[in-house]
Amino acid sequence: MQSYANAIISTFEDPEKILEQAVLEMNDDLTKMRQATAQVLASQKRLENKYKAAQQASEEWYRKAQLALQKGEEDLAREALKRRKSYADNASSLKGQLDQQKTVVENLVSNTRLLESKIQEARSKKDTLKARAQSAKTATKVSEMLGNVNTSSALSAFEKMEEKVMAMESQAEALGQLTSDDLEGKFALLEGSSVDDDLANLKKELSGGSKKGDLPPGRSGTTSTNTGIPFRDSEIELELDQLRQRAKEF
């Protein structure tokens, strides 16, 4: 499992394919381990059969030695014991091999079960890892798409649009001020109509259109008791001279 994990981490290939390949390789290893276990079990079975056969032969020759000794055949009994010892030694050797074989089988069975458990775990995690890999791919594509977007040009367009809107607002404000000034000017003309009337009256007086010595409307004149000549106020005369001068300028 560690080697599979390292292989996945150290490679830049498609994670989904790597996971599929890792599970396939683990299944291949499991198949090989099962085959090896089967071979070792078969060898163990043969050793067990040989051990049992040697043990049975040893016991059989021991029984024959007993029989020969009972019949007074001591030499025959001795030969039977030699055969028994040979089979006993063979059974003892086979017993040692059989014990070693059992240890090997136990390790193979344990590793096989461990690998089966790891494969089951890998299969259960494979879908999760594939989903995470797909999510990472999607995130990478989104990042690449965002990286290709020219945000500076978009921001520049917004800035230009903002400047244009501000210019339109300034223009509207200026037009509003001009309209207001024009309206105020009109009212100023209306308010100044009385001054124009006074000026027109003065012009008429200068041109002989009204009696000499008449005062503007709103003022009353008094005459001298001796001569009958209209009384002239010096301040008014001064103001009148100023108005005449301004009339000439017009």
Image (cartoon, helix red, strand yellow):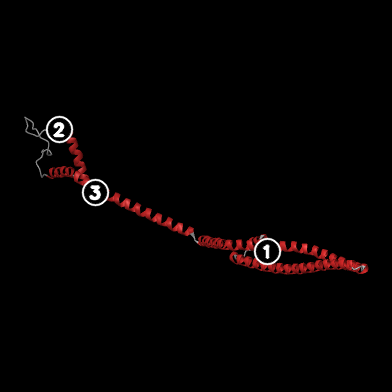
Circle 1: is it few (<14), some (14-19), or many (20+) Cα within 10 Å? many
Badge 2 is on which residue?
Answer: 233
Q: Which badge, 3 or 2, is on the more N-terminal residue? A: 3
Q: Residue at x 76, y 67 (%)?
A: 48
Q: Check disc 1 and give the amino acid type.
A: Thr
Circle 3: is it few (<14), some (14-19), or many (20+) Cα within 10 Å? few
Q: Residue at x 67, y 66 (%)?
A: 30
Q: Quadrant of residue 38?
A: bottom right
Q: In which quarter of the image is residue 210?
A: top left
Residue furthest front in the image: 71
Which label belongs to residue 183?
3
Q: Residue at x 71, y 63 (%)?
A: 108
Q: Check disc 2 and give the amino acid type.
A: Asp
- The foreground one among 129 and 54 is 54
Where does residue 122 sit, x and y in percent of width and height?
61, 62
The answer to whether marks 3 and 2 mark residues whose Cβ atoms lie closer than 8 Å is: no
Q: Is mark 2 on a helix, strand or loop?
A: loop
Residue furthest right in the image: 75
Q: Vertically, is 195 above or below 156?
A: above
* Foreground label between 3 and 2: 3
Badge 1 is on which residue?
Answer: 112
